[in-house]
Amino acid sequence: MLRPRRSGAVMVNKELDILILEKELMEHYRDVFYAEMSPEQLRNSSTSPFYHDCHDSPLSPAFFTHGTEDCFLDGTVMMSAKWQMGGGKAVVKIFPGAVHEYTLFPRDKYPEAKEGLEANCAFVRERTE
């Protein structure tokens, strides 16, 4: 498994030449992009789907996948629970060592990318065949 190396504000995986987000940088982007919004406004469903009331919406089955090294892991786990609370079926697959956007990495060099894509395809196939 290839491990990212920290380099300033982002993580750089030198073997794959890929930039990987880290939490502090994402918080900075949020603060700049939403500078005019109050904390209450940030919790509006038009800003984040996490705050949408799922109880009034028909929810299709959802596949949530994430890596343990991604700063958004908690959000994915919470969103999948919220999805189920709204009556939707949710499948969650967490890949140890995988980083942000790991399924976009070369599958021959990053086995988690291959596993994640295969799991995603299997989820779709099970519901369409």
Image (tube, rainbow, N blue to C red):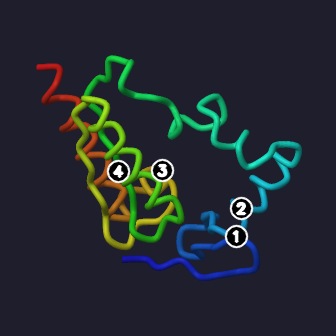
Disc 3 residue type (three-letter): Leu
Q: Residues within 10 Å of mark 1 (few under 14, many from 20)?
A: few
Residue tagged 2: 27
Nearer to us in this view, 79 or 115: 79
Marks 2 and 4, the one that precedes in the sequence: 2
Q: Furthest-right residue in view? A: 36
Helix, strand or loop for disc 4: strand
Contact, CB < 8 Å: mark 2 with mark 1? yes
Q: Furthest-front residue in view? A: 40
Nearer to us in this view, 81 or 91: 81
Residue 55 is situated, as x and y percent measured from the top left of the image, at: 36, 25
Helix, strand or loop for disc 3: helix
Which residue is found at the position 41% from the left and 45% from the top? Answer: 79
Residue 76 is situated, as x and y percent measured from the top left of the image, at: 42, 51
Residue tagged 4: 65
Residue tagged 3: 104
Marks 1 and 3, the one that precedes in the sequence: 1
Helix, strand or loop for disc 2: helix
Contact, CB < 8 Å: mark 4 with mark 3? no
Q: CA distance from mark 1 to mark 3?
A: 22 Å
Residue 129 occupies quadrant: top left
Nearer to us in this view, 18 or 99: 99
Q: Nearer the viewer, mark 4 or mark 3?
A: 4
Helix, strand or loop for disc 1: helix
